[in-house]
């Protein structure tokens, strides 16, 4: 898995966690995002390695903060220079790592309740645009905030290789708070314009698909 831009976000009011991602790669939503409800979320990309995500989530469960969990996972990895990892815990704390061998352009941003990163980008402004769109829509539904962040990233240039797949997933802070109107798993696994396809699957009108 190479060439992905993604974002992890938390709704500060409800505690819901979500992931939004896009790539010129088949079915990006099947391999990049990982969640443990009530604990946190991890995206693993470039040389994607899901076991790293599960290790990080296990460390969060043990009480480590995201930065400490990230450092522990990378210390045991055989090729950290080729990894890009994003971690967001259930309290909104985040951490990120971009290995030196991740394809250029590469970038990551960590803020409260939000972590975004990408590689094989047209420019670092892709990630900055995603974060700006996410933070600028505070108070809105988390799935729509993530969708609009993806659209902002694509408008800023996105994956320099093109488009193929995208996904958005949102989970609740507790299992007993699952609500199908809020907790969603949308995927466009092989589509010529995957981010607008996610808007369509979400039931947005055509005119709303291009809103930042």
Image: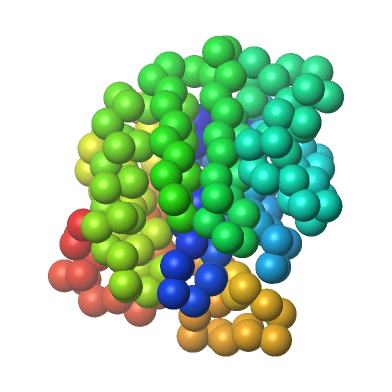
Please name whichever residue, 96 or 127, is drawn nearer the observer in this view of the structure: 96
The residue at the far top in this view is 101
Residue 201 percent coordinates (x, y): 42, 72
Quadrant including the N terminus: top right
Left or right of 126 on screen, residue 36: right
Residue under the image location 55 percent in, 64 percent down = 17
Which residue corresponds to the image point at 27% horizontal and 31% vertical from the top-left? 125
For the image, the number of numbered tags is 0
- Residue 86: image location, x then y, percent: 57, 40
Q: Position of residue 164 (x, y in %)?
A: 45, 44
> Taking 199 as reference, is 4 above or below it?
above
The residue located at (63%, 36%) in the rendering is 67
- The reply, left or right, for residue 63 in relation to residue 142 is right
Q: Locate the C terminus and report the quarter of the image it occupies.
A: bottom left
Coloring scheme used: rainbow
Q: Is residue 156 above or below residue 212?
A: above
* Residue at image coords 45%, 40%: 110
Name which quarter of the figure residue 71 lies in.
top right
Q: Horizontal placement of 92 versus 157: left or right?
A: right
Measuring from the top left, give residue 136's x and y in whole percent.
Answer: 24, 57
Residue 189 shows in the view: no
Q: Quadrant of residue 143?
A: bottom left
Q: Is residue 208 visible?
A: yes
- Looking at the image, residue 32 sits to the left or right of residue 142; the answer is right
Going by the picture, which residue comes out furthest to the left?
207
């Amino acid at each position: 898995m190479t060439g992905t831009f993604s974002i992890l976000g938390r709704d500060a009011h409800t505690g819901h966690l979500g992931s939004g991602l896009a790539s010129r790669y088949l079915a990006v939503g099947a391999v990049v995002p990982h969640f443990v409800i009530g604990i946190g979320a991890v995206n693993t990309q470039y040389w994607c390695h899901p076991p790293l995500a599960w290790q990080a989530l296990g460390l969060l469960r043990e009480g480590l903060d995201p930065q400490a969990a990230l450092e522990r996972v990378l210390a045991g990895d055989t090729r950290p220079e080729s990894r890009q990892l994003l971690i967001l815990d259930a309290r909104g704390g985040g951490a990120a790592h971009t290995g030196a061998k991740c394809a250029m352009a590469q970038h990551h941003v960590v803020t409260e309740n939000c972590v975004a990163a990408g590689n094989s980008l047209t420019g670092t402004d892709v990630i900055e645009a995603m974060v700006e769109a996410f933070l600028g829509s505070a108070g809105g539904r988390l799935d729509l905030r993530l969708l609009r962040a993806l659209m902002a990233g694509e408008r800023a240039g996105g994956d320099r290789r093109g488009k193929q797949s995208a996904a958005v997933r949102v989970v609740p802070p507790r299992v007993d708070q699952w609500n199908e109107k809020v907790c969603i798993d949308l995927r466009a696994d092989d589509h010529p314009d995957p981010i607008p396809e996610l808007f369509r699957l979400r039931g947005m009108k055509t005119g709303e698909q291009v809103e930042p």
